[in-house]
Image (cartoon, grey):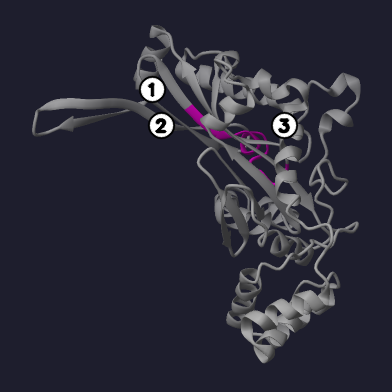
């Protein structure tokens, strides 16, 4: 639910001095004029049980910027979701580690949110199902966004916010596996297996979008994320903007074949139609036929041609391809819903 957050943190004079003593100082000079343009303090700090790296930077005595992935601090990875019920405890942990590091640091209640990534993730019965759902989603348009499909995901890029879907296993292999395998190879491979079949939906909200969501509130802090089911409600709202582009009356096979023939001629159009029927079939064994019969280049070309034909593809809604929020196929449930009352103060118990 909550992933990366960037905070702008007001500083007192004492707190700024503490950061000066610990941080790496960088001075940028204009050599022509012989004047200093700007000076900043920044560093990476390793925090949490898994030595997760968070970074900060500070340009003047009034404010420090801090950015980190909250689930990576808690779990050492972000395959699992971190829920709003866990956020306060996580921020408290980061705050105390920063306080111990610097000797003086502002309390997390005063950290102001500048950027926010929220997410949801489904674990399907296998990787092939996650890939099949992603292929359908890759062809959708998002209102007023530029679609940028890539091999393991798709982003709809915008200036204020950017939604995306991607396969978590490939993402984990690129971004976290190499780091974790150096520390604990057995754990790294267990997590790689854990990420199989996981499809993740994520939205990055920048400052302008946050101002809109919170009606230009003067300052936005973690408490605002906990009110009125803000995160699950927002995820659902922005997911529905995409899903609404699925035509409830799915194109019939005859219409699909006709469109492809009109675009590519009878012979080439029928080749792409038969490819479409096999590749996007809800029956998994049919998709495997494609990988046996076609080269990777041909698969890529046919997929691009089908995409260019603007064919409406439904993601085969069934018990295995549910992309609702909330979902019974969520990668991990909210621990607050299952923990006994006396244990709800400690909500980090997945591994």
Quarter of the N terminus within the rendering? top right
Label 2, label 3: how far apart the Cα atoms are: 30 Å
Label 1, label 2: how far apart the Cα atoms are: 9 Å
Return the x and y of residue 174 as percentages of the image width and height.
56, 56
Residue 141 quadrant: bottom right
Q: Residue at x 56, y 16 (%)?
A: 219
Q: Image height check: is 205 above or below 93?
A: below
Per the image, the residue denoted by label 2 is: 43
- Can residue 25 be seen at all in this image of the molecule? yes
Residue 264 is marked as none
In screen coordinates, is 14 left or right of 302?
A: left
Q: Nearer the viewer, residue 242 or 252?
A: 252
Quarter of the C terminus within the rendering? top right
Q: Which residues are magenta?
A: 66-80
Counting every numbered tag in the picture gives: 3
Return the x and y of residue 45 as percentages of the image width and height.
48, 31
Q: Image height check: is 319 above or below 302?
A: above
- Can residue 295 be seen at all in this image of the molecule? no
Whether pointer 2 and pointer 3 mark residues with C-beta atoms closer than 8 Å, the reply is no
Per the image, the residue denoted by label 3 is: 231
Task: Assess disc 1: are there few (<14), some (14-19) or many (≥20) residues with their C-alpha within 10 Å of its C-alpha.
Answer: some
Per the image, the residue denoted by label 1 is: 22
């Amino acid at each position: 639910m909550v992933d990366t957050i960037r905070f702008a943190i007001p500083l007192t004079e004492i707190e700024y001095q503490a950061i000066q003593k610990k941080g790496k100082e960088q001075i940028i000079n204009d050599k022509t004029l012989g004047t200093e343009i700007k000076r900043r303090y920044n560093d990476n700090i390793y925090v949490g049980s898994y030595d997760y790296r968070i970074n900060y930077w500070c340009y003047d005595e009034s404010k420090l910027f801090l950015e980190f992935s909250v689930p990576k601090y808690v779990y050492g990875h972000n395959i699992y979701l971190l829920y709003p019920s866990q956020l306060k405890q996580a921020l408290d942990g980061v705050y105390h580690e920063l306080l111990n590091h610097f000797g003086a640091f502002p309390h997390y209640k005063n950290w102001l949110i500048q950027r926010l990534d929220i997410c949801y993730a489904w674990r399907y019965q296998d990787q092939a199902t996650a890939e099949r759902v992603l292929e359908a989603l890759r062809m959708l348009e998002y209102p007023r966004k530029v679609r940028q499909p890539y091999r393991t995901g798709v982003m709809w890029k915008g200036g204020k916010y950017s939604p995306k879907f991607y396969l978590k296993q490939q993402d984990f292999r690129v971004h976290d596996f190499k780091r974790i395998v150096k520390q604990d190879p057995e754990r790294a491979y267990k997590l790689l297996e854990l990420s199989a079949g996981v499809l993740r939906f994520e939205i990055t909200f920048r400052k302008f979008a946050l101002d809109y969501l919170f009606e230009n509130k003067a300052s936005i802090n973690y408490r605002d994320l906990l009110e009125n089911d803000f995160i699950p409600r927002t995820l659902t709202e922005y997911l529905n903007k995409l899903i609404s582009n699925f035509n409830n009356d799915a194109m019939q096979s005859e219409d699909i074949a006709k469109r492809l023939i009109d675009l590519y001629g009878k012979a080439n159009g029928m080749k792409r139609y038969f490819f479409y029927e096999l590749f996007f079939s809800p029956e998994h064994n049919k998709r495997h036929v494609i990988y046996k019969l076609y080269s990777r280049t041909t698969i890529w070309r046919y997929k691009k041609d089908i995409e260019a034909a603007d064919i409406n593809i439904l993601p085969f809604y069934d018990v295995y391809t549910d992309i609702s929020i909330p979902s019974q196929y969520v990668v991990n449930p909210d621990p607050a819903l299952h923990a006994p009352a006396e244990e709800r103060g400690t909500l980090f118990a997945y591994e």
